[in-house]
Image (cartoon, helix red, strand yellow):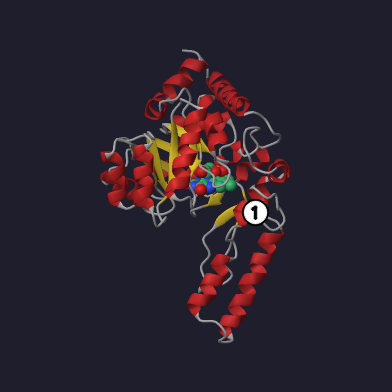
Amino acid sequence: MNARQRLEQLWARGRDYLGTERAIMGGAMTWVSDRNLVAAISNAGGFGVIASGSMSPDLLRAEIQATQALTTKPFGVNLITLHPQLDQLVQVCLEEKVGHIVLAGGLPPGAAIKAARDGGARVMCFAPALVIAKKLIRSGADAIVIEGAEAGGHIGPVSTSVLAQEILPEIRDVPVFVAGGIGRGDAIVSYLEMGAAGVQLGTRFVCATECRAHPKFKQAFIRGHAREALASVALDARFPVIPVRALQNEGTKRFMEKQREVIARFDAGELDQKAAQLEIEHYWAGALRRAVIDGDVENGSLMAGQSVGMVTKEQPVAEILAELVEQAETALARRG
Ligand SMILES: Cc1cc2nc3c(=O)[nH]c(=O)nc-3n(C[C@H](O)[C@H](O)[C@H](O)COP(=O)(O)O)c2cc1C
């Protein structure tokens, strides 16, 4: 068996599940993963996923239809489970015949999983731990995504390599896709060999030619190194901060000052706990849009994974996927 056949065999389950030529998902990225990037990934044989972020049901419907106008290949929609209109968003996906719904951002309610499944969609859920993966499968999830702390955006505390070792050998009933820190085909092969059905990459697709991100946002990724893509930290345990991995800039520096200032006002009795927590949380409101769309790379949020160091130029999606596959096949050929 040659390297190409071996790769086909290794990711056959993922390809079947996604309905694609390659079991590589383009992870949904808010403001980044719109119709253009999603259609480009799917047209190139991968699996694009629309990031619905805080879109209303009407906006999501328009984005799905616009994507369908650009590709006839399968793609998914990522829904944030905390969205107040989650049920309506699921219905929109079903009405528009979206094949795969990805539920992200917190534990999805069983009712949403059931509604999506009953409506004929496949349902992928993020599992931050083995027990949760098992619970989600019992609730009807038919695939799991495990995303390690190397990833860009909102992250959990555990690295991809540890999650993969904990979860891949234990979950065999449904396909598991591995995300976080994957920048090359060699890494894809190792997770497939450990039992993954496929992979999901986000950071690596930001500088795709087809991606609408502002040129300054892309430039920050091309210049960025792994060591600069850091997780946000809480200054004080009384005021937790959801960890987000992003390239450091003026905005991340000022976030520390903001926390310091708010905590001082709380300690002085000027703010109550709730108001202080809200003020800290609101600091980043709209910040990703400012960076991705407006190109404000100093003050906006430059969410990026540690694999950002492997992003070296702007290039078409088809070229990125071809590179990943070539690296995967080279790695397999070396194994003999
Ligand atoms: C700019 C940016 C925005 C993201 N937004 C979302 C999102 O809205 N929903 C989600 O589930 N994941 C989001 N992610 C995570 C990606 O979908 C993907 O899982 C992650 O980027 C994979 O890790 P990698 O960046 O190391 O490739 C985002 C990541 C980045 C870099």
Is residue 191 in view? no
Q: Nearer the viewer, residue 54 or 218?
A: 54
Residue 201 x, y percent position in the rendering: 54, 38
Find disc 1 in the rendering and name its residue. 290
Is residue 90 in view? yes
Left/right of residue 4 with respect to residue 227 in the rendered view: left
Residue 283 x, y percent position in the rendering: 60, 65
Q: Nearer the viewer, residue 58 or 210?
A: 58
Pointer 1: residues within 10 angstroms few (<14), some, or many (20+)? many
Q: Nearer the viewer, residue 333 or 218?
A: 218
- The yes-or-no answer for disc 1 within 8 Å of ligand 1 is no
Q: Residue at (70%, 53%) from the top-left corner?
A: 296
Q: Residue at (71%, 42%) from the top-left corner?
A: 215
Q: Residue at (49%, 50%) from the top-left corner?
A: 53
Residue 55 x, y percent position in the rendering: 48, 50
Q: Quadrant of residue 61?
A: top left
Residue 93 x, y percent position in the rendering: 38, 40
Q: Residue at (53%, 64%) from the top-left corner?
A: 241
Q: What amino acid is at disc 1?
A: Arg
Q: Is residue 117 above or below residue 291?
A: above
Farthest residue toward the bottom? Answer: 269
Q: Is residue 148 above or below residue 142?
A: below
Q: Nearer the viewer, residue 263 or 288?
A: 288
Q: In the structure shown, which secondary structural element does the residue marked by tag 1 occupy?
A: helix
Q: Quadrant of residue 114?
A: top left
Left/right of residue 279 with respect to residue 252 in the rendered view: left
